[in-house]
Amino acid sequence: MSQHEDRDVSLGSPRLASLYVVHLLASTLLTGAAAAWLAVLIYLITYLLSHNSGQGFLRFYFVHLFALNVIAGLLIGYIFNYQRRRLPSWVWIIPMVSLTIAIFLWHPPSVLGDSFSHTVVYFFGPTCYPLSFRDLFLTSIPCFDQLRLTVPFYCAVSYSLGALAARHSLLTALFSVSRENSERS
């Protein structure tokens, strides 16, 4: 085992569990908040450049919901895994289990929509475009399920991928290879 792997194994079980919970919260809540701030930043920049309010912030955020959360998760996972531990690479398990359970327990509201494709569209498809906050929480149930189940899963997976990239020093290796190639030219 390497030194980094020894560090995770040597932690006591309660400490390991609490560290896992900290990374799980960072991967879901912090990543979601960072995605919202990223959306605000991008929306303000596009608003200032175009001088047009366009589609409105809420619609902009939900059109780009998954992409913003994946980008934020990758960045936060990379930054938060500064100690190069293996533990953050596994935070996707609990959100995946909760999403999987919800998928198997969900029943379409219509008998005609009783197929797996309707389930996939409900949880992963482009059904989440609220026009107001009232639409988000009162009338748009697919939005609510995507926000509470699918988005945390995407956040946790991207956080884990960012942590994995940090653990293997992917950015350092990538930029050192590109620097070597530019010096040879």
Image (cartoon, helix red, strand yellow):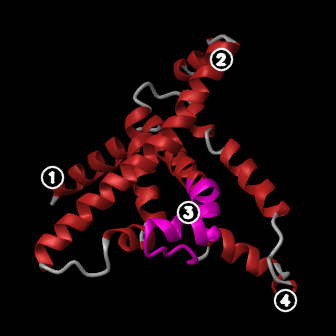
Is residue 51 shown above or below 141? below
59 within the magenta span: no
Q: CA distance from mark 3 to mark 4?
A: 25 Å
Q: Which residue is mark 4?
A: 112
Q: Is residue 144 magenta?
A: yes
* Residue at x 60%, y 29% (from the top left corner): 21
Q: What amino acid does circle 2 point to?
A: Val
**Do tag 4 and tag 2 residues touch (Cβ < 8 Å)?**
no
Q: Which of the two discs, 1 and 3, sits closer to the camera?
A: 3
Residue 38 image point, x, y percent: 31, 56
Q: Is residue 1 visible in this depiction of the protein?
A: no
Q: Are marks 4 and 1 in contact (CB under 8 Å)?
A: no
Stretch in magenta: 126-151
Could you say which disc has been placed on residue 137 in the image?
3
Which of disc 3 and disc 1 is earlier in sequence?
A: 3
Viewer-nearest residue: 1 or 159: 159
Question: At which x and y percent is residue 46?
Answer: 19, 72
Residue at image mark 1? 183
Q: Nearer the viewer, mark 3 or mark 4?
A: 3
Query: Nearer the N terminus, badge 3 or badge 4?
Result: 4
